[in-house]
Image (cartoon, rainbow, N blue to C red):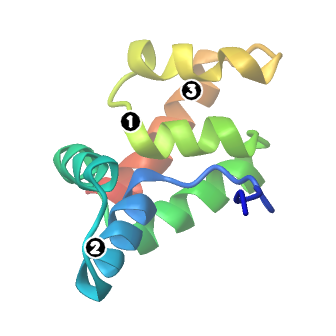
């Protein structure tokens, strides 16, 4: 019987990493899962709990979509030039001061 997609949700890379690590402890991962775990392990820069709190704050305080907030958490931009392209799907213009506030929020969670 083919598998069906029940729910679709964007999740940050730290959550993917923790999920795959738990699956690995329970049993063997598929080749694709091992490659994915290796990939996310190299990219993750923040703990899962902090990533989720940052994501929620970006959604609530800055009215960002779940997709955009997740991408910001995954990439953790360090300056306005890195942040601006991630906001193109938001269909609104952000002032430089707003971008700086978002960066300050990111820095609160990354140290």
Disc nearest the viewer among 3 and 1: 1
State whether residue 53 is above or below residue 42: below
State whether residue 65 is above or below residue 12: above
**Residue sticking out furthest to the front:** 1
Disc 2 to disc 1, C-alpha distance: 21 Å
Residue in the image at 43% along x and 47% along y: 106
Disc ID at residue 99: 3
Residue beneath disc 1: 75
Disc nearest the viewer among 2 and 1: 2
Disc 3 to disc 2, C-alpha distance: 34 Å
Q: Nearer the viewer, residue 75 or 107?
A: 75
- CB of mark 3 within 8 Å of CB of mark 2? no
Toward which corner of the image does residue 9 lie, by quadrant? bottom right
Give the x, y percent position of residue 102: 55, 38
Disc 3 to disc 1, C-alpha distance: 15 Å
Give the x, y percent position of residue 61: 73, 52
Residue in the image at 54% along x and 13% along y: 85
Estimate how packed mark 1 is, as few (under 14), some (14 to 19) or many (20 or more) residues with alpha carbons within 10 Å.
some
Q: Quadrant of the N terminus?
A: bottom right
Disc ID at residue 32: none
Residue beneath disc 2: 21
N-terminal of the pair, mark 3 or mark 1, is: 1
Q: Secondary structure at mark 2?
A: helix
N-terminal of the pair, mark 2 or mark 1, is: 2
């Amino acid at each position: 019987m083919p598998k069906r997609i029940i729910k679709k949700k964007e999740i940050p890379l730290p959550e993917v990493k923790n999920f795959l690590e738990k699956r690995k402890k329970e049993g063997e991962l598929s080749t694709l899962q091992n490659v994915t775990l290796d990939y996310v392990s190299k990219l993750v820069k923040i703990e899962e709990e902090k990533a989720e709190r940052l994501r929620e704050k970006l959604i609530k305080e800055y009215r960002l979509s779940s997709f955009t907030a997740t991408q910001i958490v995954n990439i953790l931009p360090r300056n306005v030039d890195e942040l601006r392209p991630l906001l193109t799907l938001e269909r609104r213009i952000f002032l430089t001061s707003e971008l700086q506030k978002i960066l300050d929020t990111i820095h609160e969670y990354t140290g």
